Each structure stands twice: as structure tokens, then as C-alpha cells.
Image (cartoon, rainbow, N blue to C red):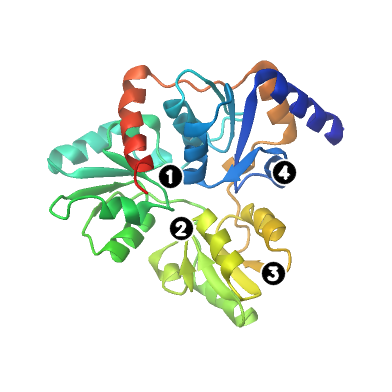
């Protein structure tokens, strides 16, 4: 049955001139059938450059919205109605209120945010390029960073900038505790600790390296170490094991799962391609403003 579904997906993809883009946290079966697997920055870059007429975004809603913002004339599909709790922690109205309290501040929106919040922002960032984005802003400018306080604090520490942090967070990364990391360190004393910057500062302080998901992969590929304690969602282990089969990985905490990222299975992907559902739409006035924020990010090298 699985092979039949895979064959249908492959055939239907060709019929539609579609491309399947999957985030590293997706189920292994989705990562394996995707044309491209990456983190948020890589997915945005691919979406901005793809010649495909249909983009199937295997991730969560803000990723599909970003693809639509960058490709208004293409069909963008999200095979399951997967959201992001962090993105829901900031609303356009609340952000406008904060901006009114800090006139002239530059608003940096983590891509884990809605199109409407991006439209209220000046520039986007991902965990891959947050430091470069912050460094691109004149030092005399005040910065409002939304919605992830942990990524914001990490970027502030790395750039020496004072920022106004929104009190949002990733529920999956934010509950990684120093105790659970120390427990893994005691069990695996030779392992290096590599964590995502969405983790709390106390966890980041224990790490040998702090990287985005794509950055973690590169770090591990380049490292001479053989064991790693990984501080990010467990779906990423699939890619790590494919690219580094000779190395061993331990999660920084148990049950390190984003349920939203796990909503797409082969059946949902096939149905989405068959019926062209769920199609993502972004109102044009919002799209144009959000496009500016995303494009400002993509122009930073």
C-alpha cells in the first residue's frame, strides 16, 4: 500500500509540475519522498527560486504562507492544517500596540510568525541568520524582536545589542531543562552538546555549539566527534543518521516531539496532490508588506 501511494505521489507530482518541500522535523517518510528537505531559511530560499507551478509545503502554516508570499502566482498546498503555537503568541494588533510604544524601532520577526505579523515587521529572520539580520540594523536603532524570546536573547548575546523581547517561545524547545541535558552528559561523557537557539538560555550555556537545524547538521558533519547530544526535535535525527551514519545521537530530552510537524503522512500528502488541498491564500495587501520583510531577509548574505 505504501509503495502504491508513493507511486501515485510521484506520478501526480509530475502531472502538476509540483515540488515537495519538507522541513527537517517532518516524519521520515515525508522527508524521504520530498524533493528538498531543509530548515526555515533553506525552505524560503528554495521557494523563492523554484520553477515549479505547485509548491507542496510539508511543514506548518507559517512555512506555507511564506512560500505563498514569495510566489503569489503559484499554487501552494499545506497537506494538513498544522499550525505553530509560537506563531500564535503574537498578533498584528498586539504588535502594533508595542510599535506605538517604541516609535522608530525596527521590528525583527522570526519566520515562525503569521503573514499578518510579518506585514507589521521590517525584516524577518530565521535561526540560521538571526545574528546577521541583527548586525545589519544600525546600532542607534531600537529593536523589537518577535515572537521567540529565546532566539532573541541568543541573538542579543551574540551581537551585543539590547532588544525588546516578545515573550513567545517554542513549547517543544522551551521545556528542555538543564537537568535533562546534564543527565545525558553524564550518561555520554564523550558526546558533544549541540542545541537549537529556541532552547532556554540555561540550556544554551551548557552547549558546545548553538545552531539552527541546518547548522547542527553542518556542525556534526564537520566535527571529528562521534557522539552528540542533540537539542532539537526528534524528526531531525532521520536526516542526521542519513548524512552521518557513522555517528551516534542522543536527544537532549525525552519525547522531543512537535505534534504539529507530525500531522502530515503519505496519505495526507497524496490527498493534497489529488484534490489540490489545502490551498494557502494571503490577502494581497498583507502579502506585499510581508514580502518586503522576507525579501529584506533574503538579501542578507
Q: Residues within 10 Å of mark 4 (few under 14, many from 20)?
A: some
Point out which mark residue 32 bears.
4
177 and 291: which is toward the camera: 291
User: Regarding mark 1 in the picture, which secondary structure is present there?
Assistant: loop
Q: Quadrant of the N terminus?
A: top right
Horizontally, residue 131 falls left or right of residue 211, namely left
Horizontally, residue 86 falls left or right of residue 16, namely left
Q: Where is mark 3, residue-wise?
A: 247
Q: Where is mark 1, residue-wise?
A: 86
Residue at the image point whose x is 68% and y is 58% from the top:
243
Q: Where is mark 2, residue-wise?
A: 174
247 and 164: which is toward the camera: 247
Q: Are marks 3 and 1 in contact (CB under 8 Å)?
A: no
Q: CA distance from mark 4 to mark 2?
A: 28 Å
Q: Give percent across and percent down for residue 98.
A: 20, 41
Q: Nearer the viewer, mark 3 or mark 1?
A: 3
Q: CA distance from mark 3 to mark 1?
A: 32 Å
Residue 60, compared with residue 188, is above or below; it is above
Residue at the image point whose x is 54% and y is 72% from the top:
193
158 and 51: which is toward the camera: 51
Residue at the image point whose x is 48% and y is 74% from the top:
208
Q: CA distance from mark 3 to mark 2?
A: 26 Å
Amino acid at each position: 500500500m505504501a509503495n502504491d501511494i508513493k507511486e501515485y505521489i510521484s506520478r501526480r507530482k509530475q502531472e502538476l509540475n509540483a515540488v515537495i518541500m519538507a522541513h527537517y522535523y517532518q516524519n521520515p517518510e515525508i522527508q524521504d519522498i520530498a524533493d528538498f528537505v531543509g530548515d526555515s531559511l533553506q525552505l524560503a530560499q528554495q521557494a523563492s527560486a523554484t520553477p515549479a507551478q505547485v509548491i507542496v509545503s510539508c511543514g506548518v502554516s507559517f512555512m506555507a504562507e511564506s512560500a505563498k508570499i514569495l510566489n503569489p502566482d503559484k499554487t501552494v498546498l499545506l497537506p494538513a492544517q498544522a499550525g505553530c503555537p509560537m506563531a500564535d503568541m503574537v498578533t498584528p494588533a498586539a504588535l502594533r500596540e508595542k510599535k506605538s510604544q517604541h516609535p522608530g524601532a525596527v521590528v525583527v520577526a522570526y519566520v515562525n510568525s503569521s503573514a499578518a505579523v510579518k506585514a507589521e515587521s521590517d525584516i524577518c529572520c530565521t535561526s540560521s541568520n538571526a545574528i546577521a539580520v541583527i548586525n545589519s540594523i544600525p546600532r542607534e536603532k531600537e529593536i523589537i524582536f518577535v515572537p521567540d524570546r529565546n532566539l532573541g536573547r541568543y541573538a542579543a548575546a551574540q551581537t551585543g545589542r539590547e532588544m525588546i523581547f516578545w515573550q513567545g517561545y517554542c513549547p517543544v524547545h522551551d521545556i528542555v531543562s538543564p537537568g535533562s541535558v546534564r543527565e545525558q552528559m553524564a550518561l555520554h561523557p564523550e558526546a558533544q552538546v549541540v542545541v537549537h537557539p529556541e532552547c532556554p538560555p540555561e540550556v544554551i550555556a551548557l552547549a558546545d555549539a548553538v545552531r539552527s537545524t541546518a547548522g547542527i547538521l553542518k556542525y556534526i558533519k564537520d566535527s571529528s566527534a562521534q557522539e552528540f547530544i542533540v537539542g532539537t526535535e526528534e524528526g531531525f535525527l532521520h536526516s542526521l543518521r542519513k548524512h552521518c551514519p557513522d555517528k551516534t545521537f542522543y536527544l537532549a530530552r525525552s519525547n522531543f516531539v512537535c505534534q504539529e510537524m507530525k500531522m502530515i503522512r503519505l496519505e495526507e500528502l497524496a490527498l493534497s496532490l489529488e484534490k489540490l488541498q489545502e490551498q494557502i491564500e494571503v490577502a494581497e495587501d498583507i502579502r506585499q508588506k510581508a514580502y518586503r520583510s522576507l525579501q529584506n531577509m533574503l538579501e542578507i548574505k
